[in-house]
Amino acid sequence: MRAAATTSPRYVTRPSLTRAGLVLGGGGVLLLVTLLAAVAVGSVGVGPGDTAAILGRRLLALPIPETWSPAAETIIFELRLPRVLTAMLVGGGLAMAGTVFQALLRNPMADPYIIGTAAGASLGAIIGILAPVLMPALALGAGTAWLGLGMVQALAFAGGIGTVLLVYAVARGNGRVPVVTLLLTGYAVSSVLAAGVALLMFVSGRALGAIFGWLMGSLAGATWQGLAFAVPLMAISFALLLVRWRRLNLLLLGDDQAGHLGVAVEREKLVLTMLATLATSAAVAISGTIGFVGLVVPHLLRLATGPDHRLLLPASIVYGAALLALADLGARLAGGIPVGIVTALLGAPFFIWLLRRSRDLSRVATA
Amino acid sequence: MTLRLRLLLILSILAMCLAACAPAASTSPSAAGTVAASAPAYPVSLTDDAGRSVNLPGLPRRIVSLAPSNTEIVCALGACDRLVGVTDFDDYPAEVSDVAKVVIGAQVDVEKVVDANPQLILAAGNELTPSSVITQLADLGYPVLVLYPESLDELYADIELVGRAIDASTEAVDVVDGMRTRAQAVADAVASAEKPRTFYEVGVFQGTIYTAGADSFLSSLISIAGGDPITGDPRSTAIQLEDLVAADPQLILLGDAAYDESITPASVAARDGWKGMTAVIDGHIVVMAEDPVITRPGPRIIDGLEALAHAIHPELFS
Amino acid sequence: MTVATEALVVARDLVVGFPLPGGERREVLRGVNLTLARGELVALLGTNGSGKTTLLRTFAGTLVPDRGTVMFEGRSVGDWRRQALAQRVAVLPQQVDLPSGFRVAELVAMGRAPHARRLFASTAEDERAIARALLDADAADLADRPAEELSGGERQRLLVAMALAQEPDLLLLDEPTLHLDLAHQVALLGAIRRLRGQRGLTVLAVLHDLNLAAAFAPRVAILDEGRVVADGPPAEVLSPDLVRRVFGVWVDEARTTNGRRHLALREV
């Protein structure tokens, strides 16, 4: 590429197609291998032949004779496959939302939850968990699905979206939402909601276990219905964010310069925030608050692909999906611990490494 | 971020403690299966403690129990050999040690439950079995019976409910009769005795004291055993130290000492603020090694009740 | 210089302020009237805090005036869609956050964003404009360098290239010679004057060096305390008397070898 630049006036103005092909193609292969491995492995052994045959019969309607037990079919098709697909959807959504928030807030420590999504969704979910316990009259209604969702998921989704809208409205002044005000408001509102969460946990009695599991994030309850709810929301968010790569790049130059280059900055910040929050809330509704994926994946990819969102956004979806599916596989093999613990165990050391690395960089810069 | 992590850390400790030993909150949907003295005719429709309607198409020959108390009920009804899945916490009766473990470290392994191919699943209520797991198993088409007794009477009803579910109604009636007789004997023995103000310590975590919640199963057992229970908040089951001092217990029972050898009558007496309590002055502090059966709502809870009565009124049971 | 007739930008009675903590506003521009004809090259001079940057930001639509109007091509700047405006107006700000990880050519390509036609790809026209902007800004040798490695002067050339890649009708330059050594100052201003001749570019440039401004621009406007206090050819406007009144500095008048007037500091 450098050689081309010296011999002709064509300059390298985008990530090379070779690199994009390697990153996305490699990611696609990784995703496929992860899918097959994660469906084939679990606490109950189902042979790879049976696994392939069950998938072939149920997904491709192949006329394969049923030589396996009904239990094996339930485990593969009703438990593992929706769980792996949910992990991929959630991982991709969180990683992409993290990429967007890091660019939008120009803050490398931003994650999808930073301006209140997690606190709001947690409060919503806990209200959903406790409502049947505190008000027995609701217990009968708790099992009924609403838009294919239980009350916990619906309240978590609404809590995430609603909190971000509230934070945004509070942070707004003179028709502008300065990034620092948004961050601080998000932190303040999150603190209030976190206190509410703690209060509810204190009086929750035995529901505390369920609340704790939700807060750590778990994919154990993944179902086809949950996927059917989240897939359309994620698809909208993915599509509308992927085509906004230019505006995300421009926002890295600061609000003023982005405006000089044609971005309607305030409107665009709101649109980007809500699209990323849509994906985050949909993810949280079906999996709880899984941490670190949305923080770590964008940073890892920036090292591999560079900061251009044209490649960074699709890559974060693909690699976030693969990473969370692998983490969940690890969680299942480790005896069913919540996947949030696995991602935190992977993510925290990375976080430390990142801090050390950025310290090295600042030393170089100030030398 | 840091806020969230700190919160999680603190609450995780709480969660593990509470999930393990908090007694019943008082407000879960009330008991229990509609009991009709009918011959077992399948299909049978039952209503469980969560108010759910459960249909059994035929006699369940493969039963999964998701709580030790449920395991004990099934075995007391003579159906121990039908269990195909239990928890890794199950320790009674000894023969269940050979049964496949489908609950490991308080996590229900749904794949293993499915692999056990159960015809009846006995879950625990109030999130002891997470409601998400109950929903998931029910959605997969398994009959899931949720048991959550909050008093002796509700426990009797639950035993009879399980009896109807597994065609052991006769055995259920026998078990319940035996339990009633023993419980009545305890009640009769303490009927005319003084009722000492009794504080049952479930645990102390980060300075917060947990005891029997108001109107909980545990507080009702203390009452039957001839004590006057000092209770905590009905939901968190916590009690403030100053409320405890004001209530001035005449007897302190240490349930947590069954799991932690560092908790002794001497260590409790030495705590700041506890010295003035009548129970401390009089030396009426008793280790309750029977805490596992006192807090496990199965047939052996009568053992726990008798142990409580012995601790509260040693003079009557010498 | 040909006398341009068509007005491109017209500012009328422009008042722009910033909110103070007490709820009042501090007015920075206090009734500015300024018209730029299409193809004109104007240097904007004034003391620190006189409102030069504020005027540029208001022209660019980044700041909204409290009172008065800025018309661009006959339409109020606030009524333009941002993208349509960015196709016509480019800004070289004093301060830009350059994100790390991008190479110079990639950043210059961002200047093409207002003209983007395709969802994910760039067009041949984009590529031509980028190459031309790099050459015009004297930044072609920087194209493959990571932006975070650039010196102050190299950064400035990159930012000029980014603005030129927009192929604007109006170029608003806030201290374009900042961080540049003398040779690069001359090269940059020469390039801008050449582009103005080739493409009819209209330029408003904030400068500090009075002699450089006089050599560069056929017209200078002087801002003092939020008002235009002088506006015209440098030979008429830049008198020792005005410099003393506006800047409070005594200067002497001299002549260069080619007959141009030169202002020399009397003492420091």
Image: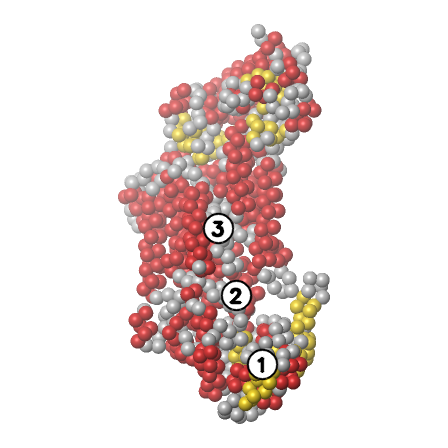
Disc count in the image?
A: 3
Residue A189, percent from left and from top: 61, 50
Residue C162, percent from left and from top: 46, 73
Judging depth in this view, the residue of B252 and A38 nearest the camera is B252
Q: Residue extending furthest front?
A: C267
Q: Amino acid at mark 3?
A: Ala
Q: Would you identify the image quadrant in which residue A303 lies?
A: bottom left
Mark 3 or 2, which is nearer the eye?
2
Q: Badge 3 sits on which subunit?
A: A
Near mark 1 (Cα within 10 A), the count class, few <14, some 14-19 or many ≥20, is few
For residue A8, say whether it is visible. yes
Labelled disc at residue C265: 1
The answer for how far apart the CA atoms under marks 2 and 1 are is 39 Å
Mark 3 or 1, which is nearer the eye?
1
Question: Looking at the picture, does residue A180 appear above or below residue C133?
Answer: above
The answer for how far apart the CA atoms under marks 3 and 1 are is 68 Å
The answer for how far apart the CA atoms under marks 3 and 2 are is 29 Å
The residue indicated by pointer 3 is A283
Residue A89, percent from left and from top: 43, 52
Judging depth in this view, the residue of B262 and C61 nearest the camera is B262
Disc 1, SS: strand
Question: Looking at the picture, does residue A274 appear above or below residue A341?
Answer: below
For residue A229, say whether it is visible. no
Residue A205, percent from left and from top: 58, 33
Q: Badge 1 sits on which subunit?
A: C
The residue indicated by pointer 2 is A254
